[in-house]
Image (cartoon, rainbow, N blue to C red):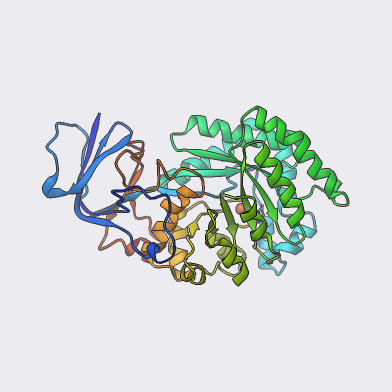
Amino acid sequence: MQTLIINIKELLQVRETAVDKVSGAEMAILPTIKHAFLLIENETILDFGEMINCPKIESNNIFDASGKIVLPTWCDSHTHLVYAGNREREFVDRINGLSYEEIANRGGGILNSAKKLNETSEEDIYQQSKVRVEEIMQQGTGAVEIKSGYGLTIKGELKMLRVIKRLANNYPIPIKATFLGAHAFPLDYKENHAAYIDLIVNEMLPKIADENLADYIDAFLETGYFSVEETERIMIAGTKHGLQAKIHVNQFTAINGIKACVKHNALSVDHLEIITDEDIEVLKNSNTMPVALPSCSYFISIPYTPARRMIAAGLPLALASDSNPGTTPSGNMNFVVATACIKMKMTPEEAINAATINGAYAMGISKTHGSITKGKKANFIITKPLNSFYEIPYLFGSNLIESVFINGTKL
Ligand code: NIG
Ligand code: FE
C-alpha cells in the first residue's frame, strides 16, 4: 500500500545519506525541503523531494499538507513511564520547602514509588502505564525507552520488565527496555550495599537475561546513591549479559562518573546538569551520547544541562523526557524541545536534531528511526498550519500536532 503526503510546506530532518548522530556545529544544521512530498510504501519511507518531482500515484491515501510542517516523530530515549500510583503529595511538600533529597531521606522519592509498585498487580501497572504510552504517541513520540527501577526486588523488577515487554508487543512504536535495579538501595540494604549489588548481579540479571527482558542496563550514579565503583560492577555485569549501559549520572554532583561510563562503553550518559570541563573532555572522541532532560530541571528547579558549553566543545547532545512520577510527571517531548530552546539556549534546529536523530542513537535505533531517509520507518508528525518550524518551540503551550503516523499508518 502506498501513502502520499503532498504540498508539505517544509519537510524537516531530511537525510539523503543516513547519519547515526550529529555533533557540535553540525547540530545547528537541520536539512529541510520546502514545498515537498513524502511517499510511503507500507511501513517505510520510499521517496521524498520537491513537489515538482512528485510521482502521480493512484491511492486512497493522499494527504494534503498545505501550510503544514512534516518531521520525524520524537525519539524519547529516557523514561520511567511504567509505574504505579503517583507522587503528587511530594510535589506539594516541595512547594512547601522540602528538597528532593529531604523527601528521599524521609522514605519518599524512589522508595515511595517502589513500595506502591510492589503492592500493585502486574495487570494494574500495565493498565496505568498504557495510558501514558498512548498519550505520548498522540504527542508525537514514535519510539521510547522505558526503565525498570521501581521494583528493587527480584519480583518487582521482573514485574516491571514484563509490563514493558507487553507494551512493546502491543504498541507499534519501538519500545526499548532498560534494567535499572540500581536505582536506589532498598531500606533493608542501606547498611549493606554490596549485598544489594550481589542480588542485582547474581540473581536479577541472569533471570532478566534468560527471559530476554532488557536491552540495556542503568544505574543512578550519584552521591548518596550508587558510587562510581558500585556502578562499574553493574556495568561490567551488564556487559557480560549483553546489556550495554545507559547511566543516570551528574544530576546533582560531579564525581568522575562519566569517565567510568565512557570506559565501560556506555551508549549514553543522562542528566548532566552538573558537568565539569574534564567530563566534557572525556566525552569527546567517545561513542557515548550525552542526554539532557530539561523537563526534570524545570520540575524540580535544578540547573539545566549546559548545552551551549557541550555543543561548543563539539559534543553531540540528545534530548529526552525522563517521564517519571517523582522528577518529571510528563512525557511530552514538545515541551522538552521548547524548554531546551527557552532555557538551554538551543536553537530550534539543534533541539530538533537532539530529539530525533540523536535520541534514536541514544536507544540504538538510528538505523531505522530519527530522520526522513529512504528505507527508514515512516514515523512522522504532520503539524497544524504554521508560519515556520520555529513556532514548534515558540508556541510552547499549544498543541501544534495535527496527526501522527507510525509505520505509515495514521494514529
Ligand atoms: O531520572 N534520578 C533518578 N531517577 C529519576 C527520578 C526517579 C524518581 O524520583 O522517581 C530521574 O530523575
Ligand atoms: Fe531518569
Classify 4 as above or below 22: above
**Frontmost residue, 16 versus 225:** 16
- Would you say 216 lies left or right of 66 here? right
| Residue extending farthest front | 285
Residues 279 and 60: in front is: 279
Q: Residue at x 41, y 57 (%)?
A: 22
Q: Is residue 38 visible?
A: no
Q: Position of residue 122 (x, y in %)?
A: 65, 32
Residue 396 screen position, x and y as percent:
41, 63
Please identify the quarter of the rendering in which residue 172 is found: top left
Q: x%, y% of residue 267?
A: 56, 49
Q: Residue at x 57, y 43 (%)?
A: 146
The one nearer the camera, 306 or 149, is 306
Please, is residue 242 above or below residue 351 in the view? above
- 239 lies left or right of 305: right
Which residue appears farthest toward the right when viewing the image?
A: 191
Instruction: State whether residue 127 is above or below residue 219.
Output: above
Above-or-below relation of 168 to 273: above
Q: Is residue 242 visible?
A: yes
The image quadrant where one finds the C terminus is top left
Tell how many labels: 0
Residue 380, image quadrant: top left
User: What residue lies at 31% left-to-right and 47% top-to-bottom?
Assistant: 372
Quadrant of image for the N terminus: top left
Residue 164 in the image: state x and y as whole percent.
Answer: 58, 36
Residue shown at 84% from the left, 47% from the top:
194
